[in-house]
Image (cartoon, rainbow, N blue to C red):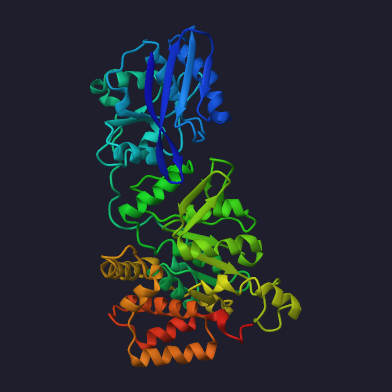
Amino acid sequence: MLTHIKAAKCIGIEAVEVTVEVDIDNGVGIHLVGMADVAVKESLLRTTTALISSGYRIPGRKIVINLAPADMKKNGSGYDLPIAVGIIAASAQAEFPEPESYLIMGELGLDGSLRYIPGGLVYAELASRDGLKGIILPEASAAEAAEIDGLTVYGAHTLAEAVEILRSPGSADALKVGRSPEPGGSAQKKAAVDFSEIIGQESAKRGMEIAAAGAHNIIMIGPPGSGKTSLAKALAGILPPMSRSEALLTGRIYSVAGKHRGATDRERPFRAPHCSASLAAMIGGGSGSSITPGEVSLACNGVLFLDEFGQIPHTVTEALRGPMEDRKVVISRMRSKVEFPASFMLVAASNPCPCGWYGEGDRCSCSPYQRASYLSRLSGPIMDRMDIQVRVRPVPSEEILRRGRAEASGAIAARVLEARQMQKRRFATEEIETNSEMSTAQIRRFCRLDGACSALLGEILEKQQLSMRAYFRIIKVARSIADLAGSADIRQEHILEAASFRLLDRVEFL
């Protein structure tokens, strides 16, 4: 008897259908075909043991299992459950009214229990798109899938429960998994550091506020202990919560990476990999069809914080250029090509020299060659893509002793949220959400400058010898400054403040 069970495979953050065909005929042995990798091939022994543990028998005949389409590599342990269900149906040990109306995925334990598999949210999107009645997953994975509207999601604990769902879907209401309630209010979780706790650094705080308002990339350069890391951590507390569409996209990335993050979790991701992170860890990678997202994708719609930026390998920093510009990353292998979203805010921090004290009186012990070599890592195309460049100075001792209370993150977050709402209205008919995402054509449309502003920007360009990319980035930052001020037009003071954040373009800094 031939049985068809619907399963799926993740490619990037999309899922494609895989049909598990099981046929039982005269002969001996169990045969698995359809370009299965080692993990899938190992599932046969795991599946047969789970079937016996759950009270089912293994037919003493030839069992042929085909994973279609046969020209696509299958990987992972999620095919255990559909294979087991297929064997049960093909051997007539249970009767299923509509097995092809459900997408089934799950890893089996030897005792018949079901374990978490990555990609639950992506599988649910496929089932909804294909018009299936429902999806059966392990309970832990079903929590992700429940975020998809209009789809019945079942969370099974064991193989026996999955079989019962297929036998009588109407009597399995207790195994249905509902969507998590939306979080109350619009505030995010409290950040690790509040801006009111950071003494001084008003210029850097202003840079952070502007960066948060327009989702701009920012780099802080200063000596050790000046507060760069604290400023970056405080940034998380002033970012507005994600919209449902943003949360759903970020949730899909985390789902395929095996990191549960529900679509109702509106807190923006904050990723802070170590400076020794490899290229594959940062950009994403893997072998064959097992390509997983990297830090640039896990930070999508949030913040990627890179501390000790000057210590990161040159190959890794150069690889950031594409994702920063295109807001996506494409990973190519000989037989596969996968695309992941990578729309993130890059927040970088670095010392100005190897010892960290260049520019702070005579405390620097580095030679001119050492300083030039170190700063060369911060210049060029990557720094050209940093919208805001801030110099963080040590806080004077008298200011530390005075310990004056600074503005709290809540007040700054309110201004940032209002600026973001202005951008949402401005880009209502566009496919972007923030000022930093504007293309050249959109800059000309939404950031028109009067004669005085154009003349001022021309003088700045000539004096600082800025690139064309820096020219447009100054305009984007000026647009965010105008939004924070509630101004419909960009004014000269907005241009001047935006240009003041092009620190590394100044000859005197080097």
Snapshot quadrant of residue 194: bottom left
User: Closer to the camera, 361 or 455?
Assistant: 455
Q: Residue at x 32, y 62 (%)?
A: 431
Task: Please state the horizontal and vertical placement of residue 274, each as a whole percent of the image.
Answer: 60, 56
Residue 366 seen in this snapshot: no
Task: Please state the horizontal and vertical placement of residue 145, each as a whole percent of the image.
Answer: 35, 38
Q: Is residue 372 above or below residue 184?
A: below
Q: Is residue 493 left or right of residue 356?
A: left
User: Closer to the camera, 310 or 475?
Assistant: 475
Which quarter of the rendering shows the C terminus? bottom right
User: Closer to the camera, 6 or 145?
Assistant: 6
Q: Residue at x 40, y 79 (%)?
A: 475
User: Closer to the camera, 277 or 316?
Assistant: 316
Q: Is residue 143 above or below residue 204?
A: above
Which quarter of the rendering shows the N terminus? top left
Snapshot quadrant of residue 215: bottom left
Snapshot quadrant of residue 151: top left
Residue 23 seen in this snapshot: yes
Task: Please state the horizontal and vertical placement of residue 50, each as a whole percent of the image.
Answer: 48, 17
Task: Please state the horizontal and vertical placement of residue 329, each as a whole percent of the image.
Answer: 50, 56
Q: Is residue 171 above or below residue 105?
A: above
Count of all numbered marks drawn on residues in the image: 0
Q: Is residue 283 above or below residue 412?
A: above
